[in-house]
Amino acid sequence: MKQPIRALLLAAGLGTRLRPLTNTTPKCLVSVGGRTLLERWLQNLEECGCSDVLVNTHYLADQVHNFLDKRPDSTMRIKSSYEPKLLGTAGTLLANQSFFEGSTSMIIHADNATNFKLKELIDAHQHKPKECILTMLTFDTDTPESCGIVEIDQNNIVKSFHEKVKNPPGNRANGAIYAFDQELLDTMNQLGTGTTDLSTQVLPKLINKIYTKHTKQPFIDIGTPSALKKARKLWGIV
């Protein structure tokens, strides 16, 4: 029987680099192309057949909860998980691991904007090499020194990481969107307590076990005013 698709949308960040805009609006509710970033991802998940979504919240959480409460009903079940204290990407994943049981799963940073279709990531993950336990979305960046750059082998498997270094070897960047199965959670549980960050504490331990799906679609981390301006120039404001 085909496994259901479930996703964790990370929407709890403080958005400090986008102030003063984020003094009153959580970053995930900033609009690009007539839709909030959160809504862009929710619609993308609906299109790929996702059955359940978990949205983690923290900063200005009431606004996010109200947005979700007012969203029109769909076949996709959506619930939120409030974090009084931020758990980190890996911490949130581990704290909610029962949510992913028996599914093909995704973890997505909701502050990115792209036209990439998540169905393509799921399809790639379902055809990944057997030695891989995670499938990562990668994209071409114009500012490789500000991103996590990956090197891959001839089979599109990650062989090294270069996290925000000067003169990295290439411009293929980690999009921080992943598809995974139970084996990833089992591996993370073996790392012990204190594992909070996926990028710095987990991924480096998975060299040669991460498959990649590359997109040529624009991909923008809406983390700064200049990035937001670029996205709105590309997709529109309202």
Image: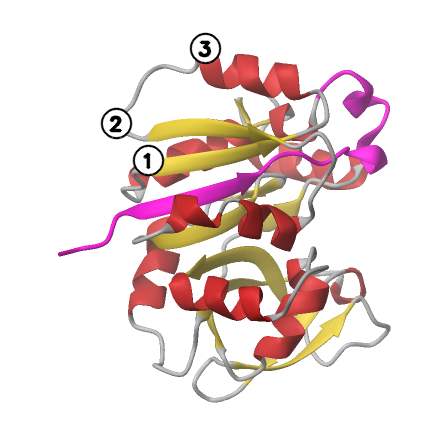
Residue 206 point in image, percent of width and height: 57, 77
Residue placed under numbered mark 2 in the picture: 75
CA separation in Å, label 2 and label 1: 8 Å
CA separation in Å, label 3 and label 2: 15 Å
Q: Is residue 9 left or right of residue 146?
A: left
Residue 34 point in image, percent of width and height: 53, 22
Please tell me whether residue 26 is drawn above or below residue 134 in the rendered image. Answer: above
Q: Secondary structure at mark 1?
A: helix
**Res 213 seen here:** no
Label 3 neighbour load within 10 Å: few <14, some 14-19, many 20+: few
Q: Earlier in the sequence, mark 3 or mark 1?
A: 1
Please tell me whether residue 109 is drawn above or below residue 135 in the rendered image. Answer: above
Residue placed under numbered mark 1 in the picture: 46
Label 2 neighbour load within 10 Å: few <14, some 14-19, many 20+: few
Residue placed under numbered mark 3 in the picture: 70
Residue 160 sits in quarter = bottom right
Q: Earlier in the sequence, mark 3 or mark 2?
A: 3
Residue 201 point in image, percent of width and height: 70, 67
Please tell me whether residue 145 is drawn above or below residue 222 in the rendered image. Answer: below
Quarter of the image with the N terminus in it: bottom left
Span colored in magenta:
1-25
Q: Earlier in the sequence, mark 2 or mark 1?
A: 1
